[in-house]
Amino acid sequence: MKYLLVDTFNQVLTTTTPDDILKLMAQQPIDMVLLDMNFAPGLNNGSEGLFWLRTIRKHHPDVPVVLLTAYADISLAVKGLKQGASDFITKPWDNDELIKKLKEVLDMQNEIVSLDEVEKEHIRRTIDRCHGNLSQAAELLGITRQTLYNKMRRL
């Protein structure tokens, strides 16, 4: 994969040890992570990949993560996307499709988002976090419930 990607992307870093991911990310700016879902021999449920996805998102929330797995499990893909993955690729991959998806993820990362969109997404996430409790969401947002209603109506 590295040989494939170096022809398209400026720099490609690889590691076979997931513990090195955060070290690499601390040493230099990383535009995107392509993360395998399984590392330990015999383990193929994706739990390692989901753990590292959460860890990367916690320490580097703006870096997109694309998940890679040999097991085309829809529920695993949904879990990964819900936990913040930008996309999901299954093995074996088509080289052209892989590069196309990675370029799309980077392009989406570089899009400029309006303040209204940022506010809308922040309000949506806060309401989701509060399980629909608008009073609690308004409190977390530091606004009144009426202001939250008005913002929801406007957005």
Image (cartoon, rainbow, N blue to C red):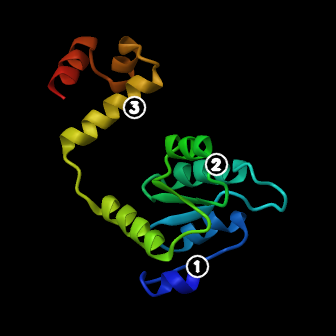
Tell me the crowding category of disc 1: few under 14, some 14 to 19, or many 20 or more residues within 10 angstroms, Cα based: few
Q: Which of marks 1 and 3 is nearer the N terminus?
A: 1
Q: Quadrant of the N terminus?
A: bottom right
Q: Which mark is residue 125?
A: 3
Q: Nearer the viewer, mark 1 or mark 3?
A: 1
Q: Which amino acid does label 1 sit on?
A: Met
Q: What element carries label 3?
A: helix
Q: What residue lies at 56% left-to-right and 47% top-to-bottom?
A: 77
- Callout 3: few (<14), some (14-19), or many (20+) C-alpha neighbours within 10 Å? few
Return the residue nearer the eye: 6 or 135. 6
- In percent of width and height, residue 83 lies at 53, 43
Residue 56 picture quarter: bottom right
Circle 2 is placed at which residue position?
Answer: 50
Q: What element carries label 2?
A: helix
Q: Nearer the viewer, residue 31 or 136?
A: 31
| Label at residue 1 | 1
**Depth order, front residue of 138/18:** 18
Q: Distance between the residues labelled 2 and 1?
A: 21 Å
- Residue at 36%, 14% in the rendered image: 134
